Amino acid sequence: QVQLVESGGGLVQAGGSLRLSCEASGIIFRLNPMRWYRQAPGKQRELVATITPDGNPGYVDSVKGRFTISRVNAQNTMYLQMNSLKPEDTAVYYCYVRDSVTRNDYWGLGTQVTVSS
């Protein structure tokens, strides 16, 4: 059974920082590209950042220079370090994987990030 469990969300003032974690189980973590998505109220879910199995990152333009995605394969965990947070970063943040073996898609339940102005 595949599980993705996010943690680390919370309420922070604009300009502050948070570090999100996504712990995966039930997949061969080291083989899988991973992604962070977010969904703000009334908006579609959007891709925020990606990371390849060997750690190469990719970012949506709106977070470049502020967010850093990383992973520790030995701990089956992915991270999203978010700095210089803005009110428009307020959203539920989700961890996502397409299992490289089964090609099934899996989502975590999400963690709420709220940035006050």
Image (cartoon, rainbow, N blue to C red):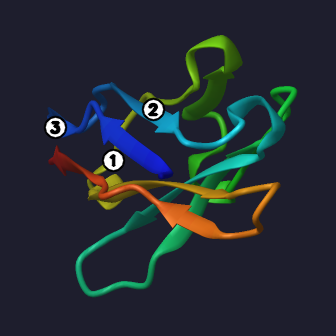
Q: In the image, residue 67 lies at what x, y percent?
A: 55, 35
Q: Of all residues shown, which one is farthest toward the front?
A: 1
* Numbered label attached to residue 65: none
**Residue that appears at 55% across and 34% down:** 66
**Residue that appears at 23% across and 78% down:** 41
What residue type is disc 3 on?
A: Gly
What residue type is disc 1 on?
A: Lys
* Circle 1 residue: 86
Q: CA distance from mark 2 to mark 1?
A: 25 Å
Q: Nearer the viewer, residue 93 or 27?
A: 27
* Circle 2 residue: 23
Q: Nearer the viewer, mark 3 or mark 1?
A: 3
Q: Secondary structure at mark 1?
A: loop
Q: CA distance from mark 3 to mark 1?
A: 13 Å
Which quadrant of the structure image shows residue 100? bottom right
Residue 52 can be seen, yes or no = no
Callout 1: 10 Å neighbours few (<14), some, many (20+)? many
